Amino acid sequence: MDYQFKDIEQKWQQFWAENQTFKADNNSAKPKYYVLDMFPYPSGAGLHVGHPLGYIASDIFARYKRLKGFNVLHPMGYDSFGLPAEQYAIQTGQHPAITTETNIATYRRQLDQLGFSFDWSREVRTSSPGYYKWTQWIFMQLFNSWYNKAADKAESIDKLVAHFEQNGSAGIDAVSDEEVHSFTADEWKALNKEEQQAELLKYRITYLRESIVNWCPALGTVLANDEVKDGFSERGGYPVEQKKMRQWSMRITAYAERLLQGLDTIDWPEPLKEMQRNWIGKSVGASVKFPIEKAAHNSQLTTHNIEVFTTRVDTIFGVTFLVLAPEHELVPALTTPAQKAEIDAYVAQSKKKSELDRMADTKTVSGAFTGSYVINPVNNEKVPLYIADYVLAGYGTGAVMGVPSGDQRDYLFANHFNLPIVSIMDIQNIETEADPTKDGRYINSDFMNGLNYKDGTARVIAFLEESGAGKAKVNFRMRDAIFGRQRYWGEPVPVYFKDDLPYLIDEKELPLVLPEVDKYLPTESGEPPLARAKDWNYRLAQSVPSALAGEVKVSPTEGDLEEAAGSYAYELSTMPGWAGSSWYWYRYMDPKNEQEFASEKAIEYWKDVDLYIGGSEHATGHLLYSRFWNKFLKDLGLVPEEEPFKKLINQGMIQGRSNFVYRLIDEMGRGTNTFISRGLIKEYKTSPLHVDVNIVENDILNINQFKNWRDDFKDAEFILENGKYVCGVEIEKMSKSKYNVVNPDDLIARYGADTLRMYEMFLGPLEQSKPWNTNGIEGVFKFLRKFWRLFHNEQWEFSLSNAEPTKAELKSLHKIIRKVEEDVERFSFNTSVSSFMIAVNELTDLKCNNRSILQHLVVVLASYAPHICEELWVLLGNQPGSLSYAPYPKFNAEYLVEDEFAYPVSINGKTKMNLSISLSLDAAAIENVVVNNADVQKYLDGRIPQKVIVVKGRIVNIVL
RNA sequence: GCGGAAGUGGCGUAAUUGGUAGCCGCACCAGACUUAGGAUCUGGCGCCGCGAGGCGUGGGGGUUCGAGUCCCUUCUUCCGCACCA
């Protein structure tokens, strides 16, 4: 039979499903290997050809590892909470769960068609209660923990409470809110329960705090920093503004240093690591307090110092002004009556400026004088205090010291406001611009004069620490992650409120199931959709101390008994999209466990992800949050590894390749129904029009299909070149509106999954971004037919010979055995596809139909084109289904040994000819053969070689 | 501005250690078979040149017997960050 891919693929997909061929065992004598794909959000649009790229690569790798004798975990699931389903629900009233279910069915059908070897018995969905029960459980652990800097790990909040009861706040080195109190043990015990809880909230790793957040009015929710791009929401592209709100946050900053250090221990792409380093943004410097001049003191003032962060504390004698961010909280209190109008105007103006304007306009110098002064702590000089929008409220302390001699922005600022510029380095040149040099010796710097950078910095920090005016400090750009969304379609937060303080619900009540609501919109009063739910309250039984057993007993005398029975409002916001994806790889290890998020045994067995494949767009979101949660779980002793993903590969983005037709424009400027071929458009007035790429092949328009494409083109006329209509091409994002979406279903229907899998790999290196181009898929399809033909005679009957294989056949086979091994291990999938083609071309030329050769070839190709190989494997007489676990053929170098090599002979580095010479000869003998060769002599033309370079088995170079 | 990746035929790409640049496909050209070809097969296909030959890996320079690969310099494209104190 001819190669009937449709029947073959359907047959084997069904076989794999029915026999659970790829079910992984949590218990095996084989070594484990965990291959993970970033699970998709099931969108309504389904998969386009770009999506499976990474899945195909990971599937080839997973299948290859099985052949190599590994116990492979290769699961798939859905990140099924998210905005699009909810937006759709708002528009249509359709429950997001239903939309999600439908979309998942589409995804599953499309994934199945590609012949992936996923263990579907382990499927997870972040939106199913059985899954988010454990997302909520992890949230509770985060709430019940604090970060102990001394131990450099998260610890139970009980331990902190015990310390407070014994020693008060003394000796606690924690990552916490800024404004924690100091107290003795007795003072702590004297606090009532509410006061204690309020204080503890400042330490919890997940906490509730009034903070400035990214508020997106169009989406009606707050967003995390990584969800905002250039002042607009990543999803939907709506404007985002800054707003002060009480919000759930995660103290990811506690892990900043570990997140940074960990990058050096994992095998990830350098650009991605760099993005995370950038995002974490560590900078080493000092914080310095500048006392506010007495004259400025007034009743509104909450502090007598302005704290700045600087990486160049050594330049402090060059300070000639201080600048606050316009949003800085001390601005109103420090503005003198005379300056009030100017400051108010400036603050108002900068508030109006969008984030984007502010970034675009970096050259104009602007600012305003507050009228107040501060004192430089190193020389007691009076320094004027300004505000300016080049200082960002969100970074450092929102205040900077102005050193115009060393910083270009300060230099421009000083010039603009006629402030003095003081040189502090002997070799500094500040005539036309600031000079940030660290070389040279300090001048105009009192006790630092004459010192170099290193000693000077140490000296000034010592001075500041002694006088209490400052200290060495490490600052991070990364902020704590906002953890609440005012949306419906997400995990409910397992918290209720009593006297405005958050308390965890009882663990036994998990999962806290998402309630039904009448509409998926905020309430009239602006509360999140969950406020619409009927009776969204936590019912607390009559105060029974035993019900609280195991919970924190902060104040046993007053606390438990005081707990009033009754119902308390649940939290109304839900968790953000990244909650469910920050731990899902553990759930795959033990997906049905109802007692734990995964059993200790399963986690101990699978440990971590050996290979993770996904897009680089998750660099500062999912991949950072996952590392954070993993480190937290490690601190609690729940998982064994510090890093979750040992090796990570970013598959390239597949862009769209749009095709255009060119519509003729008449004298009146109206579009006609005549279309001009690409090469001729210069001679006419035309306007380009997107045309469906599926009716274009190799940029040649299928005119009949075009006429049928849309009604108004039925009578279209064409001006052709060489009898063809050539379309224009542009690379754009793949989207429906550009008619450049290529659907895998269509390609599978036409060529089969094996062809599509191999073609996607054949496109180029996995990591490379490239436009999708279906041109060339024919070549891969022809290859598979040619491969199929090796096993068949002229009449398409399966027919093999049992003869001894020839040397040439063995050579071809063993070349490909080795090549695929090498390629797969270094994730170079494109090169193995071309090697397969070479092998099949060679074997075809050799008229090879030798069973012992082809039997092995099937196994080698099986990870790339599993369906055709399964079919041939059975035709070869093997057990159905056994191919997936067959041993990968053993490479034997002997078959590749040659006795002769065609040496390229070059003269002065230019290759002139090839000479076949026995490989048994040594360098001197080779030189002898070459130099005495008649053709070489002709080239030499009597000249004597100065030198002859002989590299055995490689090259001969004659230097004249 | 800072950081990263990459520039090779008409196109996608290959060359794992400094050792014959262009493998494997697509497209194209010629031929065979054919009523026909969007099927199949054979051959050709970096550029210039009839040829001998010359030139070729973004440009310029260097190291080397030998450079797509190493070094310096410069240009271009893409990605990330961006008034970060």
Image (cartoon, rainbow, N blue to C red):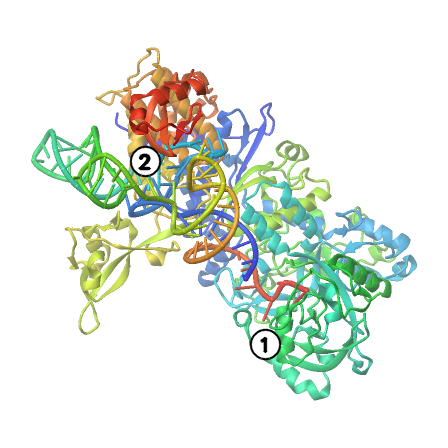
Res A195 quadrant in image: bottom right
Which one is in front, A459 or A519?
Answer: A459
Write down the residue under mark 1. Answer: A365
Disc nearer the start of the sequence (2/1): 1
- The quadrant in which the N terminus of chain A is found is top left
* Element assignment for label 2: helix
User: Is residue A950 shown above or below A701?
Assistant: above
| Residue A808 left/right relative to A197 | left
Whole-angstrom CA distance, mark 2 to mark 1, is: 60 Å
Residue B33: x percent and y percent? 11, 29
Disc number for residue A780: 2
User: Is residue A378 shown above or below A851?
Assistant: below
Residue type, label 2: Val
- The quadrant in which the C terminus of chain A is found is top left
| Residue A788 left/right relative to A952 | left
Which one is in front, A277 or A913?
Answer: A913
The label nearer to you, 2 versus 1, is 1
Disc number for residue A860: none
| Residue A821 left/right relative to A915 | right
Residue type, label 1: Val
